Image (cartoon, rainbow, N blue to C red):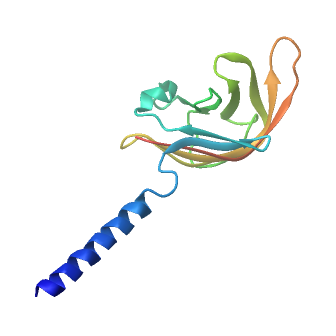
C-alpha cells in the first residue's frame, strides 16, 4: 500500500506542476484596446473600474469611451443615442473615433474613413462593449499638420 501511495502522490504533484505552468503561459492581461497603428501594435489594458474608461456618459443619449496604453497612446470612441450592434462608417455616422498619439498633446487623429463594427453595447447588467475597427485617421491641429495614420486590426472591449 505504501508503495502505491508514493506513486500516487508523485503523479498528483506532477499534474499540479503542469497545471500551474500552463496557467502562467501567455499574456494574462485583459486589454481594452488592441490595434496596429501604421504597423506598430498598441495595447491598452482594461483598468480596474469603468470610471477609468468613461468620458461622459448620458444613458440613452451618448457614450464616450477611451483607453490609453502605458506609453500614453490611445483611442476615444463616441457613440450617439440609438446606435446598436452593426457596422458603421467612421466619419459618416453616429460613431466617431479618435487616435490619440500622446495623451493631452496634439495632434489628435480623427477617423475620416473606415468602419467600426459594434458587436455588443449593453448597459442592462453592468457595462459591456465590444467592437472591431479599422480605418484612416487624419491629424487635426491648427498648425496645418495633415499627417495620416493607418489603423488596422482594432479591437475595443470593456466588461464591468
The picture places residue 39, in percent across and down from the top left corner, at 78, 44
Among the 4 quarters of the image, the one containing residue 88: top right
Q: Quadrant of residue 49?
A: top left
Image height of 53 relative to 8, above or below = above
113 left or right of 50? right
- Residue 141: x and y in percent read 80, 16
Specify whether 24 is left or right of 77: left
Kindly identify the residue that appears in the image at 31 percent across and 67 percent down: 16
Residue at image coords 69%, 29%: 98
Is residue 114 visible in the rendered structure shown here?
A: no
Depth check: 109 or 78 in front? 109
Picture coordinates of residue 136, whole percent (x, y)? 81, 38
Residue 104 can be seen, yes or no: yes
In the image, is residue 43 above or below residue 7? Answer: above
Residue at 50% x, 30% y: name it. 53
- Image quadrant occupied by the C terminus: top left
Residue lying at 87% horizontally and 19% vertically, measured from the top left: 145
**Residue 10 falls in which quadrant of the image?**
bottom left
Direction left: furthest residue: 1
Q: Pick the quarter of the image with the N terminus.
A: bottom left
- Residue 61: image location, x then y, percent: 52, 29
Return the residue nearer the eye: 58 or 44.
Answer: 44
Q: Nearer the viewer, residue 15 or 133?
A: 15
80 sits left or right of 51 in the view: right
Amino acid at each position: 500500500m505504501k508503495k502505491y501511495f508514493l506513486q500516487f502522490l508523485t503523479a498528483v504533484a506532477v499534474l499540479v506542476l503542469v497545471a500551474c505552468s500552463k496557467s502562467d503561459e501567455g499574456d494574462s492581461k485583459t486589454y481594452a484596446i488592441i490595434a496596429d497603428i501604421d504597423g506598430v501594435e498598441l495595447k491598452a489594458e482594461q483598468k480596474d473600474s469603468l470610471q477609468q474608461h468613461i468620458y461622459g456618459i448620458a444613458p440613452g443619449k451618448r457614450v464616450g469611451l477611451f483607453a490609453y496604453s502605458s506609453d500614453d497612446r490611445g483611442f476615444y470612441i463616441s457613440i450617439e443615442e440609438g446606435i446598436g450592434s452593426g457596422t458603421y462608417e467612421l466619419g459618416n455616422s453616429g460613431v466617431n473615433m479618435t487616435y490619440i498619439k500622446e495623451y493631452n498633446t496634439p495632434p489628435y487623429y480623427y477617423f475620416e474613413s473606415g468602419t467600426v463594427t459594434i458587436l455588443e453595447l449593453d448597459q442592462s447588467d453592468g457595462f459591456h462593449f465590444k467592437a472591431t475597427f479599422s480605418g484612416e485617421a487624419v491629424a487635426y491641429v491648427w498648425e496645418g499638420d495633415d499627417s495620416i495614420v493607418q489603423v488596422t486590426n482594432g479591437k475595443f472591449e470593456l466588461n464591468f
